[in-house]
Structure formats: C-alpha cells, structure tokens
Image (tube, grey):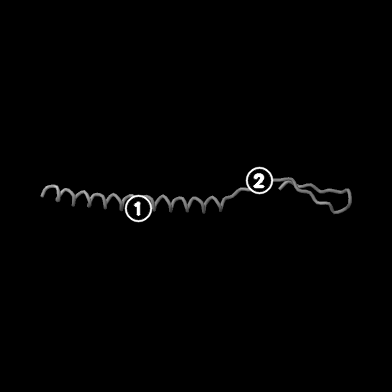
Amino acid sequence: MVSLELRDQAEFVDSILEEEIDRQVAEIMEATENEKEQTREFAVTAPTWNFSMPFAGVRYYCYD
C-alpha cells in the first residue's frame, strides 16, 4: 500500500516538474524571438565610400 501511495506522489511531482520545464522553455523561446526582433530593428550598416561620375573623368566622392 505504501508503494502505491508513493507512486501516485511521484507521478504528481513528475507532472509538476514537466509543467515547470515547459513553462521555462516557452519563456526562453519567447525571449529569443524578442531578441531577434530587436536585433533586426537596430541593424547598423557600415559607412562606405561612394562616387558618381557626372562627366567622363570627373568623380564626386562621398562617405556615407
């Protein structure tokens, strides 16, 4: 009788632990998604040299 009672308690504890793990995994996944969205919003482009040639042999340079 004691072993049956302990088995029920062990199954109850296992179900609680599974729910807690599922909740924590969901939080981690949500945080990861939020981080990806924030990273996309603040993407920095490196400045580069550009030039245009309005006439043959004439170049206008600019640094963006």
Q: Is residue 17 left or right of residue 3?
A: right
Residue sitting farthest toward the right: 56
Expressed as whole percent of the image width and height from the top left, the position of residue 1 reads: 10, 50
State left or right for residue 6 relative to residue 32: left
**Dot 2 amino acid type:** Ala
Residues at marks 2 and 1 touching, judged by CB atoms closer than 8 Å = no
**Residue shown at 14% from the left, 50% from the top:** 4
Q: Could you tell me residue 22's position as x and y percent?
A: 35, 52
Seen from the viewer's position, the closer of residues 41 and 30 is 30
What is the distance, in whole Å, between disc 2 and disc 1 at their CAs? 40 Å
Q: Is residue 48 left or right of residue 21?
A: right
- Looking at the rendered structure, which numbered label has been put on residue 23? 1
Q: Secondary structure at mark 2?
A: loop
The residue sitting at 84% across, 48% down in the picture is 59
In the rendered image, which quarter is residue 47 located in? Answer: top right
Q: Position of residue 54 (x, y in %)?
A: 85, 54
Number of marks present in the image shown? 2
> Where residue 46 is drawn, which disc sits there?
2
Q: Callout 1 environment at 10 Å: few (<14), some (14 to 19), or many (20+)?
A: few
**In the foreground, 37 or 58:** 37
Farthest left residue in view: 1
Q: Secondary structure at mark 1?
A: helix
Q: Residue at x 47, y 53 (%)?
A: 33
Mark 2 or 1, nearer chain start: 1
Q: Mark 2 vs mark 1: give the one in front.
A: 1
Tell me if mark 2 has few (under 14), some (14-19) or many (20+) residues whose alpha carbon lies within 10 angstroms of its own.
Answer: few
Q: Residue, x 88% and y 53% (percent of image)? A: 55
Kindly identify the amino acid type of the residue bearing the numbered disc 1: Arg
